[in-house]
Image (cartoon, helix red, strand yellow):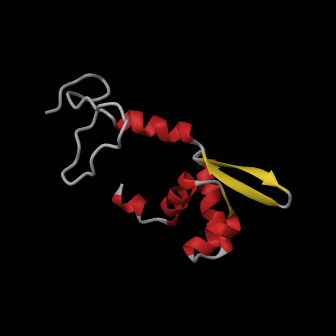
Amino acid sequence: MRCWRRTAGAAILDLLVEEERPVGDLVALLSLSQSAVSKHLKALREGRLVDARVDAQRRIYRVRPEPLREVDDWLAPLPPAVGDPPQRPGAPPRDHGGDRRGEPWT
């Protein structure tokens, strides 16, 4: 995941988690070209992580939370890695007693 966190796609998701944004705002905030931001947004759309709505002549992008919840649910049974930040407030406690199939960790 460290390699993912250092990508422009991850930076775009971080910004879209805060609020919906048009491409121009993402370009300005990330200091990337419009074509680079559009390329990453296309990949995120194809991965079903973001979607867009049309507002006059621009597209407003937003995060689709469902796929991210699926990833969070899939990762929930994993034990925390050393140095991981504390679990976010209000999140359900994680069961670290086994993997997704209920098998114990070895």
Q: Is residue 5 left or right of residue 45?
A: left
Pick the quarter of the image with the C terminus: top left
From this viewpoint, is residue 36 visible? no
Q: Is residue 27 left or right of residue 11?
A: right
Which residue is pictured at 68% across the width and 72% down the height?
Answer: 34
Dividing the picture into quadrants, the one containing residue 74 is: top left
Nearest the viewer among 58 and 75 is 58
Which residue is pictured at 62% across the width and 74% down the height?
Answer: 28
From this viewpoint, is residue 63 visible? yes
- Is residue 19 positioned above or below 71 on the image? below
Which residue is pictured at 27% across the width and 47% down the height?
Answer: 86
Measured from the top left, where is residue 19 in percent x and y? 60, 54
Q: Is residue 34 left or right of residue 104?
A: right
Residue extending farthest left: 106
- Is residue 87 positioned above or below 32 on the image? above
Q: Is residue 33 left or right of residue 58?
A: left
Nearest the viewer among 40 and 24 is 24
Residue extending farthest right: 56
Measured from the top left, where is residue 3 in percent x and y? 38, 61
Residue extending farthest top: 102
Nearest the viewer among 15 and 39 is 15
Dividing the picture into quadrants, the one containing residue 95 is: top left
- Is residue 57 positioned above or below 29 on the image? above
Count up the numbered dots.
0
Which residue is pictured at 30% across the width and 23% down the height?
Answer: 101
Nearest the viewer among 97 and 42 is 97
Pick the quarter of the image with the N terminus: bottom left
Measured from the top left, where is residue 48 in percent x and y? 60, 44
